[in-house]
Amino acid sequence: MPLRVCTIAAEFTPFAKTGGLGDVVAALSKDLHHRGADVRVFLPLYSTIHLEGIEHHAVEFLQDVPVEFGQHSYRVSVHTIRVPRSPLWIYLVDCPAAFDRARIYTNDADEHLRFLLLTRAAFECCQRMDFAPDIVHCHDWHTAFAPLLLRAGYGWNQRLFGATRSVLTVHNIGYQGSFGAHQADDVGVERSWLHQADLLAGRVNPLRQGVIYADAITAVSLTFAREIRTPEGGFGLDGDLRARGESVVGILNGVDYEEWDPSIDRHIPHRYGPDSLADKRRNKHRLLEVMGIPADDAVPLFGMVSRLTVQKGIDLLPGVLPDALASRDMRLVALGSGEPHYEAFLRGLQHRFPDKVVFHCGYNEQLAHWIEAASDYFLMPSLYEPCGLNQMYSLRYGTVPIVRRTGGLADSVQPFDPATGEGDGIVFEHYDANALRWAVGTALDWYARPGLWERIARNGMRADFSWERQGAQYVALYDRLLAQR
Ligand code: ADP
């Protein structure tokens, strides 16, 4: 009998993605399927998902299914859709009342209900499909009620769920999805199942509920798994995480090299590998030409692709980049969107250095690939970073990452040591402008030394973060949980 996994998530690349969550859920699901598991993934059919041109069909026996909880009553219909370039099909939960919105995430008053609906719909579908999962795997706050619902909401169905074990993966602890205690009945379980101190404080915290009830909690890197158990890194959940003891484990994310490899990348003009770095330079020339800034082999290009939030360390840039751009020869291409004052800073930088800086405000998958391929350095000065994918993409693209030593950045980038020639990135320790200034200065100095940048880039291209390795750790965890039944 194959391993049966029910995955419930708010994002799945390429259908719905705002960051690493979508990439990881998709890649892990494909990897599990590849290993022979029966993986059933449930994702909302957001109105931003366009089904034209993608293989899909309605699931006949999952149409107009009532999903009722608290005072709320919805009807959902399920479509199945094929993941591009993969044999995996996933389920999209259609419910316009909840998912017909301009964006994946909203600030609407029913935000918690939208994802409770998704989570409950997944259980309802399992029942109608007569699918008894070995593992229910939920991701981040959106679906973190799944472990609780497995016991309190659907525990009566012992035949289907009696032996099911739950896993919560924490991709980002900064978002916990809290809502008011006056809406506690929306969860649709007795209040005694909810965290009492939170209720007294006037709120319900979905991520905390997941931490308390999941059979295992995974964090997306070993360092992040340590950090979230400390008061500095726990965002208020460190005590609950420490209380879970060995049920909390770190598993570094993998990279989907079918999507992120410069030798096969569909999005870039010139494909290349470690032995054809000249073609990487052609990507740089082409990008800068398209962007309208002069290209020069002797001048390094720094790339950035990021959500523009506090987490990503954007606050360090004003203390470093204007001076560096004014005094040194360098180029910067940044892609991202987020908080308006960060967007304004990058726009201002482009205005001040029109021959050196391009800021593309927005979300653009193709440009994200192209920036990885074209850049000599990738800037990722994160304040905190659970895992981070872009630095791992950068390594494969021979784009030397400049990172702060935090979370998954610490676990995936090895500081380059000119004395030994070992290492694949530039790593700084302290979250301050001086440290980043040192890192950017070092990058510029090393670029000027013949052959040195190539050495670091080639070292990075050898690093292997494939899901064959990382996926095996999830399977081992599932096996451990199932052995305890
Ligand atoms: P996070 O999940 O915190 O945003 P990660 O590094 O784990 O950070 O994942 C970010 C993912 O989102 C990468 O695949 C990156 O290329 C993508 N991404 C972020 N911002 C943009 C953007 N503006 N346009 C295209 N892709 C983006």
Image (spheres, grey):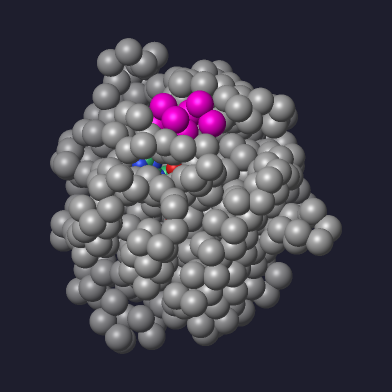
As for residue 284 lying within the magenta part, the answer is yes
Q: Is residue 341 above or below residue 307?
A: below
Q: Quadrant of residue 214?
A: bottom right
Quadrant (top left, top right, bottom left, bottom right) of the N terminus: top right
Left or right: 170 with respect to 358? right
- For the image, the number of numbered tags is 0
From this viewpoint, which residue is outermost toward the right?
Answer: 420
Percent from the top left, x then y, of residue 416?
Answer: 71, 58
Q: Residue placed at 35% from the left, 61% from the top?
A: 326
Left or right: 100 with respect to 329? left
The residue nearer to you, when weighing 114 against 219, is 219
Q: Residue placed at 59% from the left, 74% from the top?
A: 429
Residue 397 seen in render: yes
Quadrant (top left, top right, bottom left, bottom right) of the C terminus: bottom right
Residue 133 seen in render: no
Left or right: 457 with respect to 310? right
Percent from the top left, x then y, of residue 414?
Answer: 70, 58
Q: Main secondary structure of the magenta part?
A: helix
As for residue 270 lying within the magenta part, the answer is no
The residue nearer to you, when weighing 470 against 32, is 470
Q: Which residues are magenta?
A: 281-287
